[in-house]
Image (tube, helix red, strand yellow):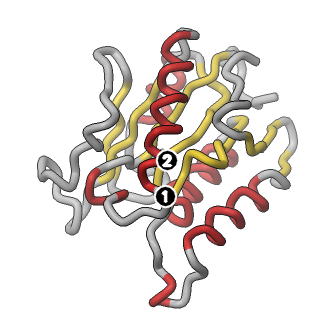
Amino acid sequence: MTTLDDRPRTALMVIDVQNGVVAAAHDRDAVVNKIDALLGRARAEGVPVVWVQHSDAELEEGSDSWQIVPELSRREGEALVHKQHGDAFEATNLEEVLAAAGVGRLVVSGAQSDACIRSTLHGAFVRGYDVTLVGDAHTTEDLSAWGAPPPDKVIAHMNLYWQHQTAPGRTAAVTSTSDAVFAV
């Protein structure tokens, strides 16, 4: 269980599912549909949803590429965290948002698997959170031209290694969209 005191709640994190981030992502439409299904379940169960939106020189704040994909919509009252680094905790108010909601467990979805997803998973874990990666609800683009494995292999590797992470008093897990559990 989480090492964070008095933080019994779970939150769904939707990381960087933005036009410019997922435009060329592996299995984009299926992943967006899975995230939409997670959103529906989280909202029906009263689970906090935290949206994370990245900006940098290539993803200029306010631009069309910076916008959340049109298939998904943030509801009023759902937290939005703006970030400029891979780890959504770095130089943001994410920790304050989660603390205010009593969240000690995260269910993570979004993009990119080998960048912001990976960084945020580790960032959460070292800060004391239990972290579950939704294995079929994260994606990445094809970076094989720069020496990376094909995207399906990157995603599979993320799922493989995350399920074996350990730390005192915390859990790491991988689940599917259909098996994701928000209640502790």
From this view, report whether residue 150 is shown above or below residue 107.
below
Q: Residue at x 56, y 25 (%)?
A: 11
Which residue position is annotated with label 2? 30
Figure check: 46 above or below 149: above
Q: Is residue 58 above or below residue 91?
A: below
- Disc number for residue 167: none
Residue extending furthest toward the left: 63
Q: Residue at x 45, y 51 (%)?
A: 90
Quarter occupied by residue 97: top left
SS under mark 1: loop
- Of 25 and 87, which appears nearest the observer? 25
User: Picture coordinates of residue 100 (x, y %)?
Assistant: 49, 17
Name the quadrant containing residue 119.
bottom right
Q: CA distance from mark 2 to mark 1?
A: 6 Å
Crowding at mark 1 (Cα within 10 Å: few <14, some 14-19, many 20+) = some
Locate residue 140, reporting x and y percent.
Answer: 49, 63
Q: In which quadrant will I find the N terminus?
A: top right
Q: Circle 2 sits in a helix, a strand or a loop, which is it?
A: helix
Name the residue beneath numbered marker 1.
27
- The amino acid marked with disc number 2 is Ala
- On the rendered structure, is 91 left or right of 48? left
Residue 174 relative to residue 90: left or right: right
Amino acid identity at mark 1: Asp
Where does residue 95 sit, x and y in percent of width and height? 50, 33
Circles 2 and 1: CB atoms closer than 8 Å: yes
Q: Position of residue 6 (x, y in %)?
A: 69, 14
Vertical arrangement, residue 140 with respect to residue 166, above or below:
below
Direction from residue 133 to residue 84 in the image, left or right: left
Q: Residues within 10 Å of mark 2 (few under 14, many from 20)?
A: some
- The residue positioned 54% from the left and 29% from the top of the image is 38
Task: Compare residues 102 and 46 and report the one nearer the observer.
Answer: 46
At 52% across and 29% down in the image, what residue appears? 37
